[in-house]
Image (cartoon, rainbow, N blue to C red):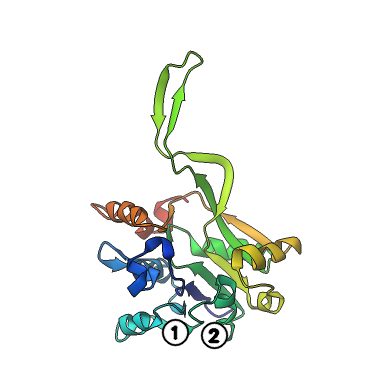
Amino acid sequence: MERAKVVILCGGKGTRSYPFTEYFPKVMMPVNGTPILVHLMRIYAAQGFRDFVLAGGHRIEMLYDYFSGRFSEWNVNIVDTGADADTGDRIYRCGEFVGERFFATYGDGLGDLDLHRLLETHERSGALATLTTVPLRSQYGLVVFDGGGKVERFEEKPLINDYWINAGFFVFERDALSQWRGHNLEQDVLPEFARNGRLFVNRHTGFWKSMDTSKDQQELEKLCVGDAAPWERPPAAKGA
């Protein structure tokens, strides 16, 4: 099979990142001076996947301008999927630019995934679609105390065991597009695949973080200080 192409959702308005996203697509928000989109693309490129389909919309002209003359080692195809299109519609509208099996992901999440393992998990399952899940992390720190009310310790934003969330990093069969129902990926498309028994998961316990707000951006910036950021390390070095 040909090398899988990578569809990245780049067209949302990112209202939680206002006012930056009034002028730029959310995926162009910088992390350590580089758009988060480029950090994401480097995750794929480092593992041999260099054919990208950017599903643009809001402020798409910024994508055209930024990628013009850059990254000659990558094949970057920017597709105008509509300024107001929903997530499911954006992927569907990229269907003519992908092969028999393709990656897809949100444009605002970084992780140290082994992408070849993701593909293998998908292939073994016989699924139309596979999504990557990560353990839910509390957005709050916990206070741990004994039966008498004495505080024993604090736990800063711990993982909540046995609860898993959708981290994106999908694999789809092209045949999935013929069974695409609805407009929103999370509310319509994926639940329909699940009801038909054609959606499986790839569990990832390594690093993953999305950038939903300016606070998330600042936290990702801090991770770039010193050694390589956690999403830049080769999968073999992490044991994820």
Q: Residue 70: where, in percent of width, then height?
A: 30, 82
The quarter of the displayed image where residue 224 is located: bottom left
* The label number, if any, that marks residue 206 in the structure image: none
SS assignment at label 2: helix
Q: Residue 57: where, in percent of width, then height?
A: 46, 79
The quarter of the displayed image where residue 119 is located: bottom right
Residue 72 at least partly seen? no
Q: Residues within 10 Å of mark 1 (few under 14, many from 20)?
A: some
The quarter of the displayed image where residue 95 is located: bottom right
Q: Residue 225: where, in percent of width, then height?
A: 24, 53
Q: Residues within 10 Å of mark 2 (few under 14, many from 20)?
A: few
Q: Is residue 82 above or below residue 193?
A: below
> What residue is shown with label 1?
77
Disc tally is 2
Mark 1–mark 2 Cα distance, whole angstroms, equals 8 Å
Residues tagged 1 and 2 counted as in contact (Cβ below 8 A): yes
Q: Residue 12: where, in percent of width, then height?
A: 46, 71
Q: Determine the residue positioned at 39% across, 59% down.
A: 234
Q: Is residue 203 above or below residue 43?
A: above
Q: Determine the residue positioned at 56% across, 52% down.
A: 165
* The label number, if any, that marks residue 97 in the structure image: 2
Residue 79 at least partly seen? yes
SS assignment at label 1: strand
